[in-house]
Amino acid sequence: MAESWIAEHSLKTLKRLLPDIEQEFATPIKNREAHWKGFTKRLYSEWERLFENLHRLYGWQYDFFYTLEQVLRVVTRAWAERPDRLIELDCEREADPEWFLSREMVGGVLYVDLFSDKLARLPDHIPYFRQLGLTYLHLMPLFAIPHGDNDGGYAVSDYRAVNPDIGGMEDLNRLARILRKEGISLVIDFVFNHTSNDHIWAKKAAAGDPEFQNYYYMFPDRTIPDQYQANLRDIFPTVRKGSFTWVDEIQRWVWTTFNSFQWDLNYSNPEVFTAMAEEMFFLANQGIEILRLDAVAFIWKRIGSSCENLDEAHIIIQAYNAMAKIAAPALLFKSEAIVHPDEVIRYIGVDECRLSYNPLLMALLWESLATGETRLLNHAMHRRNRIPEKCSWVNYLRCHDDIGWTFDDADAAAIGIDPAGHRKFLNDFYTGRFPGSFARGVPFQYNPDTGDLRVCGTLASLAGLEAALEREDPDLIETAVRRIDLLRSIMLSIGGIPLIYLGDEWGMMNDYTYLSDPMKVNDSRWVHRRKNYRKSRDDPFSRDSLEWRFFHEMVRLINIRKSMTQFQNTGTEIIETGNGRLFGYLRENSVGRILVVNNFSNVHQRVDQNELSALGFKGRFMELVENRPINVESGLLIGPYRFVWILFEYGSVD
Ligand code: OTU
């Protein structure tokens, strides 16, 4: 479509639609005249882009004009209903749009029921969050869900109701306000690829209502499903084959990418687009500052394609982004795309998702820990760590899901690694089948047709602590502790927001009780989703425990990170250390640079003096982790699984 056509028509439609909308919302507009000016300013600056996106998605439909009107109504209503305190936050964020790039940002993620039992009890843990320096708290899905299996909350029955077992919407609203006062941003999932089959829309569809049947993908026979299925991948192959579920009551095949009770929403229907936008704004208006966009890869389907990462998926998110910028500019999106690294990057942008999980770094850190080598990590990070400006990675070591080996095959091949064989090795290694493996992982979703497998387990169990403790071997225990410290130090020193899967700060280990729970036994991800109750106020660990050591080491590193301006989130330069067992990078700003070098092997490793002086490191510097001067005149020696953060302050080298 010619740009000028879009420009002209978008403006024309806006001018035609706006007067009616202004009438409809006359009262709220009158009450907040000054803010309405801000709203319309944003509307005029975002509308063209929004119009263009909607035109690409729905422009061919006879009622496109109606869709535009609806979209305008949704954003206006969202603004009208937005509480004053959030309008203030919008202004604050507009004045400081890069606030989330601060080195102060540290994230934590938890399950409310496993961490504090009730939502209303969560504020009791604020002293603990403060001790860790958290500024970002992601609560795992906490909405109304079907009884029985609900995919850990990812089958949402009502986006406007909290699961009554843990509290109500007023608790969430109150929590958001308390957290904001504490300088902590609330992060919640927007599970927008699917609803549960218990959602009112699904129930209406199942009762035969054609309007709501069109909210999902439903087919009377296998003709079309088979055409789609030919190119689809099974996400949960051990639970079910294929992406469609037969629903007897309506005699239809329903598209279910994940579990049979998770029905994929049909975004080719503009009603779904606007209905979900309303749910999104409802959440934003509770005080949620960052939405984790779940399963972004799957939201658009086309016959003949894999139905993952299609262009329209990006357009939908960009349209939501434009709407958010208009009605709730403080809102940010984080993309959850655990897919090929080329595809992960495509979701990141100022006009799409400002934040993204960094699954490649996560997977390759584990890869390096298993092999003791960093060639693949170095090679891949060199090429793929850079993202658009004013955006940020969210770096994590573990999350509530499995680990998949998402590296690029060509990256592996380029350094002589056979990708398929290597994935098999990694799976064997982390499920403890490889001789000499230290890891205690559990297999997830083995697919006999493709040989695919993923791995579950906590940071501590995967890094060898569980096995070491069982053998009561102090050396092995010490080595496992060092591995854990190593990974955590990387998460805290590389560019991006570090995200702690809470429990990992004290070395939480696998929990095998899920094996005796019929609702969980088929989903080994429960092995790392364990009860994690914390005493609220006091230091929760006894001083001679490993937990205490883990916790305080983590806090110490976090504090160093927060105190050094070089850790401001302005990117990371991956460097050549000349040693295939080390992973090094520079964090730099106008006043200095920090050289971070991590040793992934179990023996000492050297960086030669030549490499160091090429990076400007010659002479004596401060090493920040141990807080001692270090002389790198004749190279650098790093102990097994150790790491250094070396500071070079410009103008102060001797
Ligand atoms: C997400 O993950 C959630 O993180 C999972 O907990 C949910 O089960 C799932 O969506 C459904 O809501 O398949 O194994 O990016 O890897 O979206 C995890 C592709 C998943 C998928 C990811 C998905």
Image (cartoon, rainbow, N blue to C red):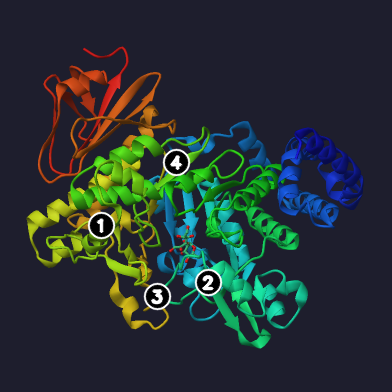
| Mark 2 surroundings: few (<14), some (14-19) or many (≥20) residues within 10 A | many
Give the SS element for disc 1. helix
| Mark 4 surroundings: few (<14), some (14-19) or many (≥20) residues within 10 A | many
Q: Is 213 left or right of 353, judged from the image as shown?
A: right
Q: Kindly report which numbered mark, 4 or 2, lies closer to the viewer in this rendering.
A: 2
Disc 1 CB within 8 Å of nearest ligand 1 atom: no
Residue holding disc 2: 243
Query: Taking the image as drawn, is residue 524 in sight?
Result: yes
| Mark 3 surroundings: few (<14), some (14-19) or many (≥20) residues within 10 A | some
Residue 147 locus on image (x, y percent)? 53, 81
Residue type marked 4: Met
> What distance separates the C-alpha of mark 3 from that of mark 2?
13 Å
Residue holding disc 1: 421
Q: Of the residues under marks 4 and 2, which one precedes in the sequence?
A: 4
Q: Is 154 left or right of 603, judged from the image as shown?
A: right
Q: Nearer the viewer, residue 309 or 397?
A: 309
Residue holding disc 4: 105
Q: Kindly report which numbered mark, 3 or 1, lies closer to the viewer in this rendering.
A: 1
Q: Kindly report which numbered mark, 1 or 4, lies closer to the viewer in this rendering.
A: 1
> What distance separates the C-alpha of mark 1 from that of mark 2?
28 Å
At 28% across and 61% down in the image, what residue appears? 508
Q: Of the residues under marks 1 and 4, which one precedes in the sequence?
A: 4
Residue holding disc 3: 238
Residue type marked 3: Thr
Give the SS element for disc 2. loop
CB within 8 Å, label 3 to label 1: no
Residue 466 locus on image (x, y percent)? 19, 64
| Mark 1 surroundings: few (<14), some (14-19) or many (≥20) residues within 10 A | few
Q: Of the residues under marks 1 and 2, which one precedes in the sequence?
A: 2
Residue type marked 1: Gly
